[in-house]
């Protein structure tokens, strides 16, 4: 199995768990939890694909994503306490996931012949908008609007990717460096409590 594809699947699984746990905290029923898990895992990529005209959207062409989301729901319910103990591990997977999804979304948009600016925007959408939809449906203020260095990390990585691409750097090395940048920014932001300034 391709490494990037494996991480993509792992990120999908982790985001689905995140959605399920959020639904559980809100006392949603099983159907509601399934909807939140699906939206969290594939919502960003779905919005991206619809905006750039890639149809059917990605998860409709590969049932592995739906299978993983389906497995994440009972996994989350039955192992909830154990998962919460692994919060640091889950956070790491989330950081890896947003890094990978940012660059994959950016590359897919460029492949459709759209401008670099739009590609950067779609990279960020791919990474964070599943979480935005989850929070809205769960009546929460989305994470990216709460001073968190989250979407900003994705934006920085996407811009660096385009810069290194224009410099002629090998694509695989470029992906690795930019994904690492996103992960590093996200981890440091949480550890050092970096925050975006608040509008006053």
Image (cartoon, helix red, strand yellow):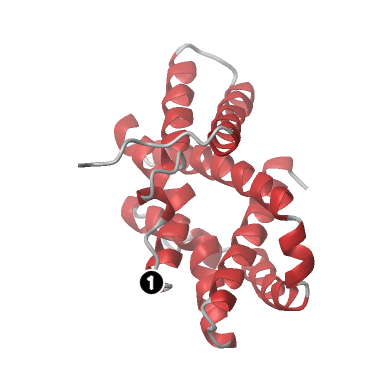
Q: Residue at x 73, y 71 (%)?
A: 80
Q: Residue at x 67, y 48 (%)?
A: 93
**Badge 1 density bin: few <14, some 14–19, many ≥20, Cα 10 Å:** few
Compared with 16, 88 (above or below) is above
Which secondary structure lies at badge 1? loop
Measuring from the top left, give residue 45's x and y in whole percent. Answer: 46, 55
Measuring from the top left, give residue 30's x and y in whole percent. Answer: 59, 86
Residue 115 visible in image: no
Q: Residue at x 47, y 11 (%)?
A: 167
Q: Quadrant of residue 118?
A: top left
Q: Nearer the viewer, residue 178 or 1?
A: 178
Q: Nearer the viewer, residue 74 or 167?
A: 74
Measuring from the top left, give residue 31's x and y in whole percent. Answer: 55, 86
Give the labeled residue for mark 1.
Answer: 139
Numbered disc total? 1
Residue 12 visible in image: yes
Q: Quadrant of residue 84?
A: bottom right
Q: Outermost residue toward the top? A: 167
Measuring from the top left, give residue 87's x and y in whole percent. Answer: 70, 54
- Specify whether 95 is left or right of 132: right
**Quadrant assignment for the C terminus:** top left
Q: Nearer the viewer, residue 84 or 6?
A: 84
Compared with 81, 144 (above or below) is above
Compared with 120, 177 (above or below) is above
């Amino acid at each position: 199995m391709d490494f990037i594809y494996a991480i993509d699947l792992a990120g999908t699984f982790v985001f689905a768990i995140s959605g399920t746990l959020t639904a559980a905290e809100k006392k949603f029923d099983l159907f509601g939890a399934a909807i939140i898990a699906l939206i969290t895992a594939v919502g960003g990529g779905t919005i991206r694909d619809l905006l750039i005209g890639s149809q059917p959207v990605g998860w409709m062409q590969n049932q592995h994503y739906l299978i993983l989301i389906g497995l994440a729901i009972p996994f989350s319910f039955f192992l909830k306490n154990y998962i919460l103990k692994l919060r640091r591990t889950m956070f790491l997977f989330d950081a890896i996931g947003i890094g990978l999804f940012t660059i994959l979304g950016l590359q897919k948009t460029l492949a459709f012949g759209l401008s670099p600016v739009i590609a950067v925007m779609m990279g960020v959408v791919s990474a964070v908008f599943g979480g935005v939809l989850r929070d809205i449906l769960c009546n929460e203020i989305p994470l990216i609007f709460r001073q968190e260095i989250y979407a900003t990390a994705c934006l920085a990585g996407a811009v660096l990717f385009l810069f290194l691409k224009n410099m002629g750097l090998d694509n695989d090395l470029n992906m690795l460096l930019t994904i690492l940048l996103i992960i590093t920014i996200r981890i440091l932001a949480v550890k050092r409590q970096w925050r975006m300034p608040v509008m006053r």
